[in-house]
Image (spheres, helix red, strand yellow):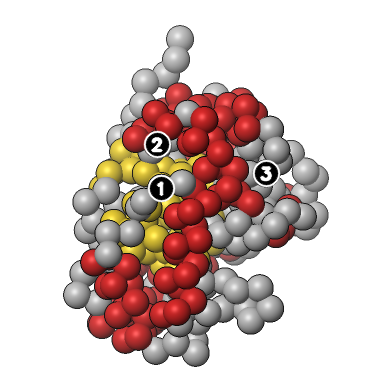
């Protein structure tokens, strides 16, 4: 018998008008020339109740493919099956410029967004995120650019990725609309946002929190633990998963989702079965003692 969700399967994304699933599906490893296989991944996510898709214009280069390859592949899926587009919230990112490396100037970002729209085959993206902070662009100038994108109808909401709390505050100061989301590296092994103010700010400003690499780039998956701290966290998650009848990976997603900032883990798998399995994280609830046990393992020391 399939367990019924104990955690709400959706939530509002910050102060935006978007409603998103509690899990997102990421396309950093979305690659290849097999459109049917790519469509199978998209449909597996949708069937699992994952209706929040996250991509970026830079995705492709890390897979030995051209800049924009992941967006292009998704665009090919949507061209073949256009009915799928209305079933998910589409997020992409821009602002990384190979060789620069970051560029949030008006001219570059507007051109980057137009290129993303063309590759995706859409007229608007639901959430456009600045992928990395460009410290050579004043936040007031970035705010003007984002406002123009919004006014042009090319984006519906604005998010940031890998910004510090101070950088978010600076940008929000110049915006006349709220930032919808922040995307940060967060996992049971990468716990800095829990203690450095990032999640506290998200709760204060009601920012949606997207957690990239929730399995710590695979270190919490099937590979062998490389150090005692990783082994301790894996053991704690193994125990947590066993108590609820789920895998270590699912336990990791559920552990993140239990935080009151309501982080949205970005599932990176490109295997339909693994994508479907991630949804089991909605079926379990974690009590405080079990949650803190994982945190203590991650800290490598008792709570103060």
Secondary structure beneath dot 3 equals loop
Q: CA distance from mark 3 to mark 1?
A: 19 Å
Residue under numbered circle 2? 85
- Label ID, residue 31: 3
Is 30 drawn above or below residue 94 in the view shown?
above
What residue is drawn where x is 27% and y is 59%? Answer: 153
Residue in front for this viewpoint, 164 or 200: 164
Which comes before the other along the chain, label 1 or label 2? 2
Residue in view at x 33 percent, y 72 percent: 146
The reply to whether residue 237 is in sight is no
Residue closer to the observer: 57 or 123: 123
Residue drawn at the location 31% of the way across and 38% of the way down: 10
Residue 99's disc is: none
In the rendered structure, the answer to whether residue 114 lies left or right of residue 65 reads: left
Q: Is residue 5 left or right of residue 297?
A: left
Tell me where residue 181 appears, x and y as whole percent: 35, 61
For this rendering, which residue is in front, 54 or 116?
116
Give the residue pinned by disc 1. 122
Name the spot of residue 154 as percent of width and height, x first. 33, 59
Are dots 1 and 2 in contact, CB under 8 Å? yes
Q: Quadrant of the N terminus?
A: top left
Under tag 1, what secondary structure?
loop
């Amino acid at each position: 018998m399939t367990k019924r969700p104990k955690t709400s399967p959706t939530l509002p994304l910050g102060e935006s008008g978007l409603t998103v699933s509690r899990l997102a599906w990421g396309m950093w490893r979305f690659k290849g020339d097999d459109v049917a296989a790519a469509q199978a991944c998209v449909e597996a996510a949708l069937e699992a109740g994952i209706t929040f898709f996250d991509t970026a214009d830079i995705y492709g280069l890390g897979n030995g493919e051209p800049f924009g390859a992941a967006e292009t592949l998704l665009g090919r899926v949507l061209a073949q099956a256009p009915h799928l587009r209305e079933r998910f919230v589409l997020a992409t990112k821009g602002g990384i410029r190979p060789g620069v490396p970051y560029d949030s100037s008006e001219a570059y970002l507007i051109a980057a967004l137009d290129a993303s729209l063309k590759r995706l085959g859409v007229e608007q993206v639901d959430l456009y995120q600045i992928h990395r902070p460009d410290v050579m662009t004043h936040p007031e100038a970035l705010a003007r650019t984002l406002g123009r994108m919004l006014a042009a109808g090319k984006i519906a909401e604005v998010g940031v990725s890998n910004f510090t709390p101070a950088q978010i505050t600076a940008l929000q100061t110049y915006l006349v609309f709220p930032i919808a989301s922040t995307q940060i590296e967060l996992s049971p092994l990468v716990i800095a946002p829990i203690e450095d103010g990032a999640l506290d700010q998200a709760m204060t400003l009601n920012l949606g929190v997207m957690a990239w690499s929730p399995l710590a780039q695979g270190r919490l998956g099937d590979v062998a633990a490389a150090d005692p701290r990783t082994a301790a966290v894996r053991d704690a998650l193994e125990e947590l998963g066993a108590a609820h009848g789920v895998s270590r990976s699912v336990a990791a997603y559920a552990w993140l989702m239990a935080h009151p900032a309501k982080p949205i883990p970005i599932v990176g798998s490109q295997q339909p079965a693994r994508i479907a399995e991630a949804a089991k994280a909605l079926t379990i609830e974690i009590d405080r003692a079990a949650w803190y046990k994982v945190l203590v393992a991650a800290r490598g020391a008792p709570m103060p």
